[in-house]
Amino acid sequence: MKKYFKVIICFIGLVCAMILILGISFSYITNYKKVTIDTSNSPDGKHELVLQAIGEPKFPFGSASGRLVLMEEKDKIAQADFELRNDGGSITSNCWIVTWYENYVKVILSGEEQFDEQIILNFDGTVDMKQLPDTEVAEQENDTSVEYTTKPDSIDLGESNQKNITEQVDKAKKAESWTMDESNGTMYFFLDEQNGWRLVVVDAAAGSRFYVMERTADGGDTWERINEDPFDNQAGVAEGVMFLDDNFGIAGLAGASQSHSTLYITKDGGRSFGEIKLPMSTVTELPESAKEYGFTVEDYDYLNMPQIGATTLIIMVTTDKGENDGIVFESEDGGDTWKYRGVTQN
């Protein structure tokens, strides 16, 4: 009888322990588990903003807890927690609009049951938060100083804006490669003192941007829009733009997470672009690091901007931006065809 009683007690204890473990697990998932929803990178690639959901929305139609984390390289420099009232909905990549500036990043959070909320994370680690009344939201949507939310056609080129453009043009002319206007994401490239191109942001969402291409033949005094959609309706972050002469050029577009990218080639001065397709099926070797991390050829999908040889173009394909181990392709006919040339690794 005593043995039977002990078995019953042990069974009850085991059931209670299982219930306790399940309860703790459920509480962690619903209240504390952090999930990365989306990321956005600064135009210069030095900073990354991470949008996280914490737990699940409060049942049945409560708010959802979230967090913004600002990173500088691998270090966290600022953090902001928030509550999103979205009729019981979860936090998604559609709930935020990110705007990068020289010294800070601004986020607008939108939910169905709240005024928009503005959060500014400064690169010095400080954070400013406030709710935006409808009138202020409308004013910001029409504010020409707010990048990525206004169309260039509607921008009033005031004195300060024109001064900035002049400074950016001068900087681009002196540079050996493309340059980025960190205030609005525009990317410039000048072939010489007179001929230049720029990729101008016309719209953005969730860290990705849409661009148009403009060209100048008078040193930047005037600009002509020559291509309304250089990246074939794809959104992302411009990786680079370069021209070897008045007609031949290459532009790159990376995903918002910068884990993949695509290169586009033009032979008519930027008026039309075609995607560069590399013969990945011909790859016979991967870098040694592929075994260590379990990579397959499909994981190599970040096409770095090409290196220019004496008579060739060389593209290195990596798994992410900034990686040194990659697959090498070469073109000897101006980008018409590409051949696999092996791997490069440290």
Image (cartoon, rainbow, N blue to C red):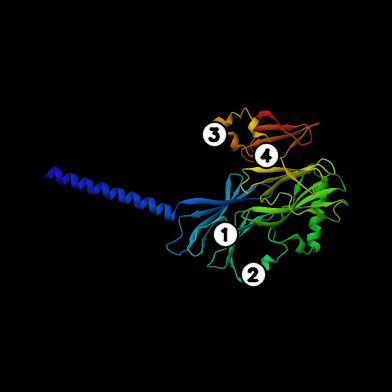
Residue 87 visible in this rendered orientation of the protein: yes
Nearer the observer: mark 2 or 3; the answer is: 3
Q: Is residue 339 above or below residue 167?
A: above
Q: Could you tell me the amino acid type at mark 1?
A: Cys
**Cα separation between marks 2 and 3:** 48 Å
Nearer the observer: mark 2 or 1; the answer is: 1
Considering the numbered disc 2 on the image, is that residue within a helix, a strand or a loop?
Answer: helix
**Cα separation between marks 4 and 1:** 30 Å
Considering the numbered disc 1 on the image, is that residue within a helix, a strand or a loop?
Answer: helix
First of labels 2, 3 by sequence position: 2
Q: Which residue is mark 2?
A: 136
Q: Which residue is mark 1?
A: 95
**Cα separation between marks 1 and 3:** 33 Å
Q: Could you tell me the amino acid type at mark 4?
A: Leu
Q: Which residue is mark 4?
A: 303
Label annotation for residue 293: 3
**Cα separation between marks 2 and 1:** 18 Å
Would residue 253 appear left or right of 215 to someone viewing this image?
A: left
- Is the residue marked by circle 1 packed among few (<14), some (14-19), or many (20+) residues within 10 Å? some
Q: Could you tell me the amino acid type at mark 3?
A: Tyr
First of labels 4, 3 by sequence position: 3
- Is the residue marked by circle 4 packed among few (<14), some (14-19), or many (20+) residues within 10 Å? many
